[in-house]
Amino acid sequence: MHRRRLDLRLRFAGRENLARVRALVASLLREETDVPFRDDEVDEIVLGLQEILTNVLRHAYGGDPTGRVDLRVVVFGGRFLARVRDRGAPVRADALAMRTPSADAEAGRGLMLVRRTMDRVRYGRRGQVNFVHLERRAQAAGAPR
């Protein structure tokens, strides 16, 4: 069996580019992989990735439209791997805590959502660079997550 490895690298700035990034990643997962992801998995992966990218643009860069984000997506053998890097403000330690916001909270569900859509989420900072690593494996057809 021929295994196909996809390796996508993007650099972008500004929230206006998120829809294009989301569409590109969804298209790759649906059409270009050796082990296909189900539609519901693609939707979840794209949702989790978009949440991370939105958080970088909103929080790390404080909404600055010139803040650049480096995104690398690798898809191989039924695995989705993403690395998001930025040079914005570091993430506050309390923001990484796993907690459920109150029902009437208007914000605070983003990282909880990301953790539910991914098998693994890891954050770190090296020097002036933040990074987030995301991983998700394709489920067998018909298998619940």
Image (cartoon, helix red, strand yellow):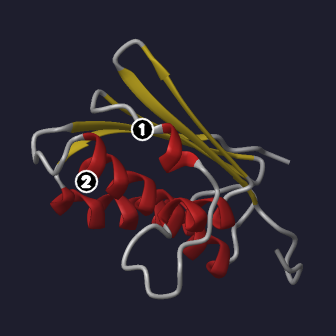
Q: Distance between the residues labelled 2 and 1?
A: 12 Å
Question: Count of labels shown?
Answer: 2
Q: Which amino acid does label 1 sit on?
A: Val
Query: In the shown orientation, is residue 18 left or right of residue 6?
Result: left
Q: Name the residue under label 2.
A: 58
Q: Picture quarter containing residue 87?
A: top left
Judge by depth and name the residue closer to the eye, 1 or 118.
Answer: 118
Q: Mark 1 points at which residue?
A: 91
Judge by depth and name the residue closer to the eye, 6 or 112.
Answer: 112
**CB-based contact (under 8 Å), mark 2 and mark 1:** no
Q: Picture quarter containing residue 22?
A: bottom left
Judge by depth and name the residue closer to the eye, 44 or 112.
Answer: 112
Q: Which of marks 2 and 1 is nearer the N terminus?
A: 2
Q: What residue type is labelled 2?
A: Arg
Q: What residue is rendered at 29% in x and 32% in y? A: 89
Taking 27 as reference, is 72 above or below it? above
Question: Which x, y percent locates residue 111?
Answer: 53, 59
Q: What element carries label 2?
A: helix
